[in-house]
Structure formats: structure tokens, C-alpha cells
Image: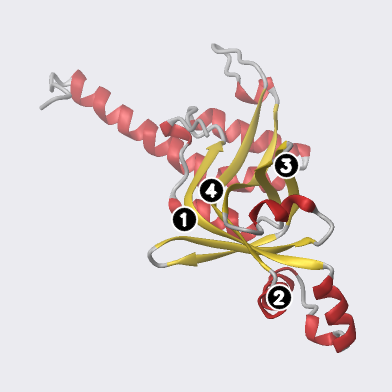
Amino acid sequence: MYVPAHFAMTQEQVADVLASAPAGDLVTTGPDGLVATYVPMLHEPAADGPGRLIGHLSLVNDQWRVAAASPVEALFIVHGPGAYVDADWLSTPDTPNVPTWNYVTVQAWGRLVVHRDPEWTLEAVRLLSAAHSDASVEELRPEAVARLLRAVVGVELQLTRVEGKAKMSQNKAPQVVAQVIEGLRGAGDLATADWMDRHSLPRARAKADLLAGIRGRQGEGESPLD
């Protein structure tokens, strides 16, 4: 994924997106080329690495078969807040601009492992249910659970690399970032506005303060290399 340095996310931000995303695109390569399934998966972080994603696929979805014999490389893509940004929000009296799209996305690479063990899959179902609702698989009758497990296979993405990109106007001047936030709130996109208020605006202000300090030292005759 192309990630300019000013759009790179911190590991904490990446973990937050993985934890909060309800689902994502699981992408693999099969005999007929690329295959993708939009599926919920639960991120389980690890102390010594990026951790893993667990979930399940329908038995009739042939995508799992590419990893049935041995693990294969796979990619999981999730998205955080995102919205259209009007040109007026990005413009100042002296600097007109063009519209764009702000977004947060995380891509996770790893080895896809298929689990046919009903107990493994049942635990994955339990964890996913607990993460997204108050409902529990334990409320179902045993025969209903058995039917469920016969219809799915467990999948685990053992992560090797995770990258995040937040193109959220954090490289703009604080005035412009504030205008975008105000415009988004007026348009009803509170999730994107809130993300920018928490992350983009403080970063833009810190950059502006740094540049102002450098210009001030140069104005006093101090070399930026001193």
C-alpha cells in the first residue's frame, strides 16, 4: 500500500481500526485468480507481533479451499471513517482548492489457515458474537449449534504485517483542517469529523508550531542547523 509519511498511522491507531471495524475484505489468490469475501473477523493482538484475525466462512464459499491443504498468503482490508471533502472546506481566500476524499484504511497481510475442527470454529463464533452483540451462541439449542457448525469452516489469518493509512487532511494548515471538520459536521458525517478532531487537528497544529519556531529562529539569525 502506498503510504506517504505524513499519512502513516501509529500502531495504536491501526489497532483501534482493526478492533472497531465490523468486517473487511478477505483477499486470496485461487485457480481463477483473485477472490475476495466481505466477512467479519476479530483481531486478537499479540505481545510479540501483530497477532491474528479469526472468523469463519460459509462451507459453500470455495475461497477457503485454497488454504485447506496448507496455509496461503492472504490480505485483509478494513476501512475506518471516510467522507467526501468539498473544495470550499479546503480553500482559503488566497488559495482555492479542489475536492477530495478523506479516508482511513488498514491492510493486514498474513498466512490464512483453515480450521475444520468444530470446537475451534465454535470458539471463533462465540468470540465474534460477543464482540458485536449481546447475543450468545449459548442461547441456541445444541442441535441448532451443530447445524451452524456444519455449514461453516473456521479461518485464521496469522498476521505478518499490518499497515495503516489515514488521508485525513492532517498535512493541511490548522485553519483548513478546522474548516473541513466544520464542513463534515454540517454535512452530518460525525465519525470522520470526530476522527479529524482527535488526530488531524492536533497534528496540524504541532506542525504549524514547529514551522513557526523554525521561522522565528531564522528571523533572529539562527541557522536551522545550529
Which residue is rendered at x = 89% and y = 81% of the image?
144
- Asked which quadrant contains residue 213, the reply is top left
Give the class, few, some or many, for how many residues have Cα within 10 Å of label 2's Cα (few <14, many ≥20): few
Q: Which mark is residue 35?
A: 3
Type of amino acid at the residue the image marks with label 1: Glu
**Relative image position of residue 199 (x, y in whole percent):** 51, 45
Marked residue nearer the N-terminal end (2 or 4): 4
Q: Report, in whole angstroms, how far the alpha carbon at label 3 lies from the one at label 4.
A: 15 Å
Q: Report, in whole angstroms, how far the alpha carbon at label 1 lies from the one at label 2.
A: 22 Å
Looking at the image, which is closer to me, 51 or 221? Answer: 51
Q: Secondary structure at mark 1?
A: helix
Q: Which mark is residue 12?
A: 1
Which residue is rendered at x = 86% and y = 84% of the image?
140
**Relative image position of residue 78 (x, y in whole percent):** 64, 48
Mark 2 sits on what residue? 130
**Is 112 situated above or below 176?**
below
Looking at the image, which is closer to me, 46 or 37? Answer: 37
**Relative image position of residue 179 (x, y in whole percent):** 61, 31
Give the class, few, some or many, for how many residues have Cα within 10 Å of label 3's Cα (few <14, many ≥20): some
Marked residue nearer the N-terminal end (1 or 2): 1
Which residue is rendered at x = 19% and y = 25% of the image?
217
Marked residue nearer the N-terminal end (3 or 2): 3
